[in-house]
Amino acid sequence: MIRTLLILIFGMVIIETKTFAREVTFEWDALPSATGYEIQVAQKADFKEVQFQKTTKDPQLDADLPLGRYFYRVRAIDQKNRPGHWSDPMDVAVTPYSPELKTPKNESNYSYFELPPKLDFEWKPVDGNVEYEIFIYKTTGKKALETKTKETHFSTETIGEGEYMWKLRTIINGNFAGPYGEPRRFLIEKKDFQAPSLVKPIGGEGVPAYRPVNFTWKMDPVVHFTDMDLQKSEGNKDKNFKLPEVGKNLKDMTDYTVPYMEPGEYKWNVRTKEGESTEGKTAKEETFEVRNDLITDGNRSVNFGLGTSLDQRRIGSTTYNAGGSTRSISTKYFPWEGFGLTLDESSEEYLRSPWTQPNQTFTAALALRFGVVGYHQELIFGYRQADDIFADQNSNFFLLTTSGPVVGMLMEGTISRKTRFDLLFRYFKPLSTLEDFGAYVSDNYTGGLTFSWNVIDQFWIHYGFIYEKTISSLKPSGTQDTVIEWETTRFEPIHLGISWEF
């Protein structure tokens, strides 16, 4: 029986046929009576097809074999050149070498926030039609990833925080795997990032209703996506309250505009995150109120009113009473927060004689506006054209068309989110007449109180009453001493209106 010992010498030999091969040294114990030895190598243990056969005088032999699994046997040759019995077959695997690793370098460090980093593994190619098996594991020994590829590089974004090792081996024909090469170590560290902070609107801040609202926030530069959340405040009990839609997965944005918001109490927040589906971090929630009584650029309104009036004119010792109906229309526009334009027109129709002529008034004015949330004032400076009716001592009635400067103040206060009140004070000083009656002097004082209710969206209804007093005198042309004086009081106990305000 021939005892054999296989010793593999780890080294690569490139041969002319481009067969991927390894140098193998076969060695066995020498026999004193043997003059030589014969060795056979086959891919099957029955040796019906011999891959390699050779004789040698020495008890060892070097051979280059292609990669694969083999069986070999040896027999001795005596001095008369007679072969002995074959030894029992022994198997040997000729495996490919492990590739040379390129990147990442040993002791490489990676860091990330929420999305694991992209790891690029690369190695030098091995000749032949081979596969590569990459094995990544934690330093504790727990497997993290094991996969095969025909390429000389591999990338993954699935490995999280921890200390890892990676190594590589070559596989040929899908069966014969070489040994793993020397492993390399790398470290992945997870870092923290700052939670976002809300900039505006913030707690206690009022926002104009029925117009775009811009939300802004600050976020850590390392994050790229934002989810915005907008909710109805617990204090808002309106069942018809409409909640606008807001943005999700806003990429690289620090502001978002909601195109339309109704009055009400809201709370909002943002969650910033590194990836679209990562957990992210949430800011401290803020509450704010959308109001329809804020002074801001672009405020405008149109008001239609109807009312009943009671008029009393006293000329000398004679008093005239009349009732009538009134209609009015007014518009306001504030291109800037504190400065705007107003136009007002009203007409009063008397219901009985002797005042058959309508009393009309037209006013154009500039408005200066200032105030705080829930309360503001408007100072008006303008010009008015108005009608006035008087009777002479013979009870002849005449229509005077007057004009002059008008100044006034409007104070507006909020009672609740849907109700408010308005106080009006106005002074009108006619300077001349449009009819050649004579020297006309007049002072007009007006005051009013109105309550308003927000019925739907931008529409309000109003109820108010107005008191007006005019003290007038006229010295007719061509007379020396005759001066006609009269005093008019006008009261609107019912003044109903509807307005569109934006």
Image (cartoon, helix red, strand yellow):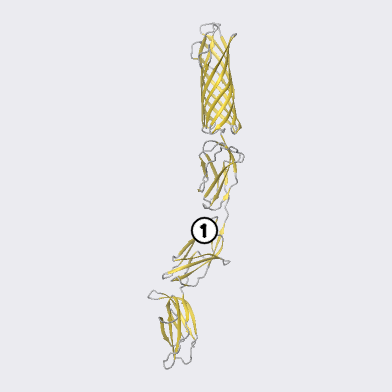
Drawn side of residue 171 relative to residue 406, left or right: left
Which residue is label 1 attached to? 117
> Which of the pair 415/161 is nearer the observer?
415
* Image coords of residue 92 (percent x, y): 47, 78
Given the image, on which type of amino acid does mark 1 rest?
Pro
| Residue furthest to the front | 239
* Image coords of residue 376 (percent x, y): 59, 30
> Which of the pair 325/101 is nearer the observer?
325
Q: Compared to 306, does 476 lie above or below? A: above
> Which of the pair 106/33 is nearer the observer?
33
> Which of the pair 495/161 is nearer the observer?
495
- Where is residue 453, by image quadrant? top right
Drawn side of residue 97 relative to residue 473, left or right: left
The kind of secondary structure element at disc 1 is: loop
Drawn side of residue 17 relative to residue 195, left or right: left
Q: How many marks?
A: 1
Query: Label 1: few (<14), some or many (≥20) within 10 Å?
Result: some
Q: Compared to 421, does 197 lie above or below? A: below
* Image coords of residue 213 (percent x, y): 53, 39
